[in-house]
Image (tube, helix red, strand yellow):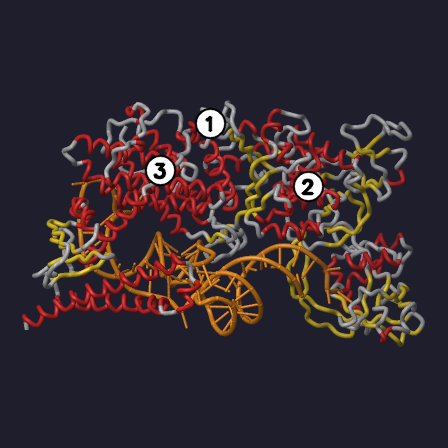
Amino acid sequence: MQLPKTYSHKDIETKWYNHWMSRGLFAPADRPGPSFSMVIPPPNVTGSLHMGHALNNTLQDILCRYKRMDGYRVLWVPGTDHAGIATQNVVERQLAQKKISRTALGRKKFVETVWNWKREAGDAILHQLKALGVSCDWSHERFTMDEGLSHAVREAFVQLWEDRLLYRAQRLINWCPRCKTALADIEVVHEDADGTLWHVRYPLADNPAQHLVVATTRPETMLGDTAVAVHPEDERYQSWIGKKIRLPITGRIVPVIADAYVDRAFGSGALKITPGHDFNDFEIGERFGLDKISIFDADARIDANAFLTRGETGDWVARYGGKDRFEARKLIVGELEREGFLEKAEPHKLSVGHCYRCQTIIEPYLTPQWFVDIKPLAKPAITVVQEGKIRIIPEGWSNSYFAWMENIKDWCVSRQIWWGHQIPAWYCVSCDRANLIEGADGEYRLGKAAKPIVAREVPSHCPICRGRELIQDPDVLDTWFSSGLWPFSTLGWPEQTEDLKTFYPTSAMVTGFDILFFWVARMIMMGLKFMGDVPFHDVYIHALVRDEQGQKMSKSKGNVIDPLDVMHQYGTDAFRFTLAAMAAMGRDIKLAADRIAGYQNFVNKLWNAARFVQMNSSSLNSADLDGRNPLQDRDLGFAERWIRSRLAFTIAEARAAIDGYRFNDYANTLYQFTWHEFCDWYIEMSKLALNSTDGVIAERSRNLLRAILDDILLLLHPVMPFVTEEIWQTLGNQRESIMVQPYPVPEESWSDAQVERQMTFLMDTVRAIRNLRTEMNCPPGKEVKVIFYDAGEELGLLREQEPYLRSLARVSESEFREGGERPKGAATAVIGTTEIYLPLDDLIDLHEERARLSKEVGKIEDELARVQKKLGNADFIAKAKTDVVHKEREKATQFEEKIRALRASLDKLQEIQAERN
RNA sequence: GGGCGGUUAGCUCAGCGGGAGAGCAUCGGCCUUACAAGCCGGGGGUCACAGGUUCAAAUCCUGUACCGCCCACCA
């Protein structure tokens, strides 16, 4: 079959993807061999493919396809994450459009709705991944909430509980008043904001004429103040310590305490203490046994109930009850000002925590939650990275990893949402009656002292009172709890499956730095804990994809580039190649459209090279060679030996680059070889041999063209799977697929340093002649005569390769002289020791050529001066490596020689000009 | 407040101790029978700045400026 004149990616991509699927080529090969495994960072079921996914999965696919071709049994496990809060929010928004609230629906119906939605729309992203060409084994697809993984989650939870690494406690946690759930510390995004620092007068209880001034950015929380703190050594306040303050508004009497935490230099040096709504104040409260008043309800509105139950009945309770925290702030500042308690207000920069899922400002909130005692898990997780059992690439990220792990705080894993793994803990209704509070939504809330019964399956009765009425903890687990188990839960854990034995630990984890702590760190801790081994050997951390200006892509900025659009417009191969080429380590990717267009041209170039090869080997199949590899031929021509040598180099480079996760080097090496060596030079040179009357020479060239192209296709396949398959198949290779062909291996005997040197010289010569022609305005069609002077062996080489000079530089006639009189009036260039003359007589513009030569001489003189300065430096001669000195000396000689030759030519031109005048 | 990364050709970026590179853009010439999505040739950079180490610095060290991330409980 003939390759069409132009490549159209549109029809081809789906065709081959289906082909690979139907042949089951993504599954691990059914034969012995080393294994290579990866688990996909599971995208959120809510998600649609964005640039981050595209980059992430392209890189993983490159690794998998490479390893698969290279003889490994490759398993790449795909799947999705239930993404608790994110998904719940999406479905809630959809319901809201239909004017249905989650609470009105009830938990059971709501969770059903999410499942239905997940089944309908949740796989969209997987289809988009398929469009990207990923070679995941879809028969291994998993979802974090499918049965097996839910089993794994329960098992992990129970084991942690049994090992006393899990506990339930009332603590100040980060609360999102919109999602109405607790969040882990890392789920809070801190952002700088312009706020106000209010200085508020706190009068002494028994002498209202005297007051302290406290500074606060959150005056509304003074409703929950239970102390005022000063520094124990602060001379200004020695007499105040131990006295009582009567708080404005509430009139609550609170003590003045002394704690070294207080910064004397800040504000007035007195700090209001709100243990119920500030993490630092909480700590101080613990130290001093202060009351912790929770002044807000779950919506972060002032909770009048909280005061009433404390017996505080002032009218302020009614006035502020039910007010939103920001409204309350305004009202309270107003009241303070009216009542003369506000000393001043000044602008103040502060950092405000936001919910990573909905951007709502976080409220520190006192609630009972489940925590993982993380330090015992973190310790071995630090060790494995220190000892190199896990390599983090690029290495710089390990610093962040260590810093985070060493200062890690207990992990709050309970979430007050409905979509997720419900915590496998139950409470006995009769034993724990005092702790069961029925909420407005019909859900129980559990008091801080409730006694959980943690079990793998629903317990039949209470182990204490044998009561049969048990209720399950309403909370669900942090999404990242189940993703932390992903590398082994997807392989069947806790069952000891074949997959688990064969593919755990996985080989590599490819991910973005944004989830290094969220996910990677947790997987390492969980893997070590439950599997007793690292979850992966390498962690490759890639950059973030940004827009052309370097801005993070976001919907609100409207600068999002949809990968599907890009794939549609430029083709998936061009897109993948772009991502790989730009994935230099440790640097963000600014994606520019014209860059993708540039690589689309590369796809086109490859296509046309293939067409050329096909046209010249129409009857040739790989099979026709009887298994003989043309690259092994002992008797090859000059150009063949050269391109084969370059191929060997390229294969070695490609392998080294991909083995070292240097995807950009991988792409660029292949680009350079394919375009600028194979197409620019070898194909052009092959035309000579193809037209040869000697049938042996022509066939040898045909075979080699084909062999090199085949290897290019194989080398490029991991990054450009579609076009390489299309060409491979159309050229009549075996029908299975290029994706299961062996990846090229370079042979030492192919490398030929001498031929490469000779070719470099020949290329320089050709370029010099082309350059002279252009400079002299010699039309491309016009053939020229060239005279070469050289005393050394280069002359022989040029004589031998003269046909190439004819075809590549349009030289009609050449003379080779070892010395003697140089031609009069010729354009001149010098390559090494070889002088090149183009006697252009009528064509030559003497003036122009003299100007050109003078400029050239000037340039070389500058270079020579620099080299001579170096050589004149005794220290350089003494201290620099000998080969460096040697090189410099050679350069000097060459420059001198070149200058001499060019000057001579210049003189001749002058003579002619003199004659003419 | 700590930590990390960046600053190289008009743009997007490689290079990270020994002659400044690529792609795109630009200029000039080519419809040369694979490719005008192409071919051939050219121009363009005191490698942010200031010190230092070294025979030698875009490359290593220190500092400065600007940009961008991450972490952190100074109200």
Q: Residue A525, which numbered label?
A: 2
Q: Amino acid at mark 2?
A: Met
The image position of residue A343, as x and y in percent, is 78, 74
| Quarter of the picture holding the C terminus of chain A | bottom left
Q: Residue A712, which numbered label?
A: 3
Secondary structure beneath label 1: loop
The image position of residue B22, as x and y in percent, is 35, 53
Farthest right residue in view: A206
The image position of residue A41, as x and y in percent, is 57, 40
Chain containing the residue with disc 2:
A
Q: Residue A25, which numbered label?
A: 1
Inter-mark Cα distance, 3 to 1: 21 Å
Q: Amino acid at mark 3?
A: Ile
Residue A469's image quarter? Answer: top right
Secondary structure beneath label 3: helix
| Quarter of the picture holding the N terminus of chain A | top left
Inter-mark Cα distance, 2 to 1: 33 Å
Please tell me how crowded label 1 is: few (under 14), some (14-19), or many (20+) other residues with Cα within 10 Å.
some
Secondary structure beneath label 2: helix
Inter-mark Cα distance, 3 to 2: 42 Å
